[in-house]
Image (spheres, rainbow, N blue to C red):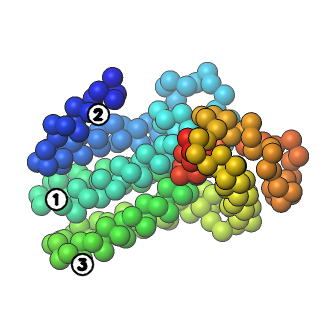
Amino acid sequence: LAVVLALVVALHLRSKHVESLLKLTLIPATLNALYALMQKSGYELFFRNYGLDIFEGRAFGMYGNPSYLGQALSLFSIVALFLLFSAKKRSHIIMYGLITVTLFAGIVVSGTRTSMLGLLVAGFLMLLRFVLHRIHVSRKQIIVTIVACAVLISTAALYAPLRFSFSPVAIRSLSSRLEIWKGAVELIERKPFIGYGTNTFQIYFPDVISKDFYALEENLELNVDRVHNELLEVFFQYG
């Protein structure tokens, strides 16, 4: 059904409908961000009976994983920023500004660091595009965007200093990711064309675990269930 819907949209969508479609995508994204904020505040409606300690207090909305929530909201945040910059009416600027801040807040409570970094880079590139193409942007829109980014960074630093910082814990986490990526690349080189299939990384990763990874994690029994990198994940699974 999803494939059929995607084909129908792809075949019949016109440029004049793109903006309306983008606006529609912000509705579930904003609801997910609000639900993530509710989760962080202690109001869990649907997953009370599930073991959520594995997420260590990170909100996940309806995505089942905090990282997936952060990835999705970062994409929708770019859409919201685009609509914010494109808005002409004051009411629209305020509305998209509030939506952008809500999505930013959802990313913060998800604790997804790479999503925040990617969002900041994408926001800078978008602003650069507007400047280079001399697209008119009001002073208010620029101020709202700068304030939103400042709130995102400061809130993240105050909310979870261990995750959003250059602390030893954060550096160790990054170093572990690098070791995982090295192992993933080695596995991909062995089967570059057909991959290993979905949900199989934890089966094959023990073959390439390095001593440095064990030293960083200080746990000889630890295994890894995913690559923690979407691009490498795709190559690993499908070649």
Rendering coords of residue 162 (x, y %): 66, 59
| Image point (67%, 53%), residue name | 189
Disc 3 crowd rating (10 Å Cα; few below 14, some 14-19, many 20+) is few
Q: Dividing the image into 4 quarters, which one contains the N terminus?
A: top left
SS of the residue under disc 3:
helix
Image check: 39 left or right of 163? left
Of the 4 image quadrants, the one containing the C terminus is: top right
Which residue has dot 2 on it?
6
> Which residue in the structure is indicated by mark 1?
87
Amino acid type at mark 2: Ala
Q: Amino acid at mark 3?
A: Leu
Residue topped by disc 3: 132
Question: What kind of element bears circle 1?
Answer: loop
Q: Which mark is residue 144?
A: none
Question: Does residue 62 appear to the left or right of 124 in the view shown?
Answer: right
Mark 2 near mark 3, Cβ–Cβ under 8 Å? no
Write the residue at 26% across / 33% down: 7
Report helix, strand or loop for mark 2.
helix
Q: Position of residue 217 (x, y in %)?
A: 81, 53
Say if 161 sits above or below 67 in the image: below
Picture layout, residue 178 above or below residue 223: below
Mark 1 or mark 2, which is nearer the start of the sequence?
Answer: 2
